[in-house]
Image (cartoon, rainbow, N blue to C red):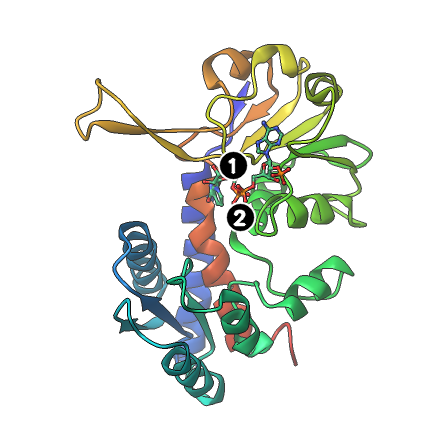
C-alpha cells in the first residue's frame, strides 16, 4: 500500500509557483494578485480565507481581503465584484461560500468575470471544462487530478467509481476522469443516494473517489485488492482522545481499507491539503493570461 501524501504534493506545487513568481518579479512583472471577499463571520470560512492568505504569502502573491458584515446587501457585494472585474491589478478573486441566505449565490457567481474566476465556479468555466477547453478547474477536482498525476497512477481504461454527484466534487471529477488523455481515459460510473448495488459497483472499481460526506462509509468488503482509493470526505466528529475534543473523519474506513489498496489518501493530509494550491495555480494562470488570451 502506498500512502498518497497530499501535504508533500502541495509543498512541491507551492515551491514551483514560488520559483515562477520570483522569476516574473525579477523580470520586472508585478506579482500575481488574488483577492477574496468574505461575508459574515462563519468560522470555517474565516479559516479557509486565512489559509488562502497564508498560501499567497508563501508563494509571493499579493493578496487582498474585503470583509462584509453578515447583513451586507447583495447590491454591495455585486458592486465590489464589478470593481474587481474592472481592476487590472487584480488577476483573480473569489467570493467565499456559503453566503448569507438573503444573497443569491448563483447571481454572485455569475457576476464574476470568468477570466478572473479562479475558483472555477462560473458556468463558463464549468462548461469549458466539460468540453475539454482550457478553464479554471475548481479546487477539489484539481487537487485530485494533481495527486493522480504526480503519483503516476495509471488511469487509461480503468474503471473509476465516483461516489457523489455534487457540482463541486462528484460531477467535475467524473467528467475529468472520462476526458481524453492522462490522467483521464477512465470508464466512469457515478453513484449517488439512489444507486442500487453500490457495494458491488464499488467492488468492480480500479479507482474509487469517495465524495459523499458519510464518515467511514467505504469498508474493506467494498474495495477490490489493488484498488486506488481517493477519500474526499471530511466530517468533524467528537473525539475523547484528541486534545481539541474533535477529529476529522473521511468517507473511507481507512484502517481496514488501506491494506487492500495500491494507493490511498489519508484524512487529513490527503485531498484537502491540495485544494489551496488549485487557487494559487489558477491565479498564476490568470496573471499569465494562460486560459483566456
Ligand atoms: N477534501 C476537501 O478539500 C473537500 C472539498 C469539498 C468537499 N469535501 C467533503 O467531501 C464530502 C462531499 O462533499 P460535497 O460538497 O460533494 O457533498 P454534497 O453536496 O452533500 O454531495 C454528496 C453527494 O453524495 C451522495 N450521497 C450521499 N449519501 C450517499 C449514500 N449513502 N450513498 C451514495 N451516495 C450518497 C449524494 O447523493 P444525492 O445527489 O442523491 O443526494 C450527493 O450526490 C463532504 O464530506 C465534504 O466535507 C472535502
Verify CB contact (< 8 Å) between mark 1 and mark 2. yes
- Residue 140 is marked as 2
Kindly tell me whether mark 1's CB lies below 8 Å from ligand 1: yes
Percent x, y of residue 288: 55, 76
Question: Would residue 240 be visible to someone looking at this image?
Answer: yes
| Mark 2 C-beta to ligand 1 under 8 Å | yes
| Image position of 278 with respect to 31: above or below | above
Q: Quadrant of residue 122?
A: bottom right
How many marks overall? 2
Residue 24, given in percent of the width and then of the height, sits at 45, 76
Tell which of 121 and 227 is nearer to you.
121
Which residue occupies the foreground of this view, 183 or 243?
243
Against 181, residue 261 (above or below) is: above
Residue at image x 41%, y 58%? 98
Q: Is residue 28 visible?
A: no
| Quarter of the figure that contains the N terminus | top right
Q: Quadrant of ligand 1?
A: top right
Which residue is at 42% across, 43% downward?
273
Residue 114 as seen in the image, left or right of residue 70: right
Secondary element at tag 1 = loop
Which quadrant does the C terminus fall into? bottom right
Give the residue drawn at x 28%, y 66%.
70
Residue shown at 66%/21% (left/top)? 227
Find residue 214 and report its horizontal and vertical position in percent.
Answer: 50, 28
| Rendered view: 36 above or below 231 | below
Q: Farthest front residue? A: 102
* Mark 1 surroundings within 10 Å by alpha-carbon count, few (fewer than 14), some (14 through 19), many (20 or more): many
Residue 232: numbered disc: 1
Examine the image and state in which quarter residue 226 appears.
top right
Instruction: Describe the element under mark 2 as helix, strand or loop.
Output: helix
Give the distance between the C-alpha atoms of the residues marked 1 and 2, in whole angstroms: 8 Å
Residue 54: assigned label:
none
Amino acid at each position: 500500500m502506498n500512502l498518497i501524501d497530499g501535504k508533500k504534493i502541495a509543498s512541491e506545487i507551492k515551491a514551483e509557483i514560488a520559483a515562477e513568481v520570483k522569476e516574473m518579479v525579477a523580470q520586472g512583472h508585478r506579482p500575481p494578485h488574488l483577492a477574496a471577499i468574505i461575508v459574515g463571520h462563519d468560522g470555517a470560512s474565516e479559516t479557509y480565507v486565512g489559509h488562502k492568505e497564508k498560501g499567497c504569502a508563501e508563494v509571493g502573491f499579493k493578496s487582498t481581503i474585503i470583509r462584509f458584515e453578515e447583513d451586507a446587501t447583495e447590491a454591495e457585494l455585486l458592486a465590489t465584484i464589478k470593481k474587481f472585474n474592472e481592476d487590472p491589478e487584480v488577476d483573480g478573486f473569489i467570493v467565499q461560500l456559503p453566503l448569507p441566505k438573503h444573497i443569491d449565490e448563483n447571481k454572485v457567481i455569475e457576476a464574476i468575470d470568468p477570466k478572473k474566476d479562479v475558483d472555477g465556479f462560473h458556468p463558463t468555466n464549468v462548461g469549458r471544462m466539460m468540453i475539454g477547453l482550457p478553464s479554471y478547474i475548481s479546487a477539489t477536482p484539481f487537487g485530485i487530478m494533481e495527486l493522480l498525476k504526480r503519483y503516476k497512477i495509471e488511469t487509461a481504461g480503468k474503471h473509476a467509481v465516483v461516489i457523489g454527484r455534487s457540482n463541486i466534487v462528484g460531477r467535475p471529477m467524473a467528467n475529468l476522469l472520462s476526458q481524453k488523455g492522462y490522467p483521464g481515459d477512465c470508464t466512469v460510473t457515478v453513484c449517488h443516494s439512489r444507486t442500487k448495488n453500490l457495494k458491488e459497483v464499488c467492488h468492480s472499481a480500479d479507482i474509487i473517489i469517495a465524495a459523499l460526506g458519510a464518515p467511514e462509509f467505504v469498508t474493506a468488503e467494498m474495495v477490490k485488492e489493488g484498488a486506488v482509493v481517493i477519500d474526499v470526505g471530511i466530517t468533524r466528529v467528537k473525539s475523547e482522545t484528541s486534545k481539541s475534543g474533535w477529529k476529522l473523519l473521511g468517507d473511507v474506513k481507512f484502517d481496514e481499507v488501506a491494506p487492500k489498496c495500491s494507493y490511498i489518501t489519508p484524512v487529513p493530509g490527503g485531498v484537502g491539503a491540495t485544494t489551496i494550491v488549485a487557487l494559487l495555480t489558477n491565479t498564476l494562470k490568470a496573471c499569465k493570461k494562460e486560459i483566456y488570451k
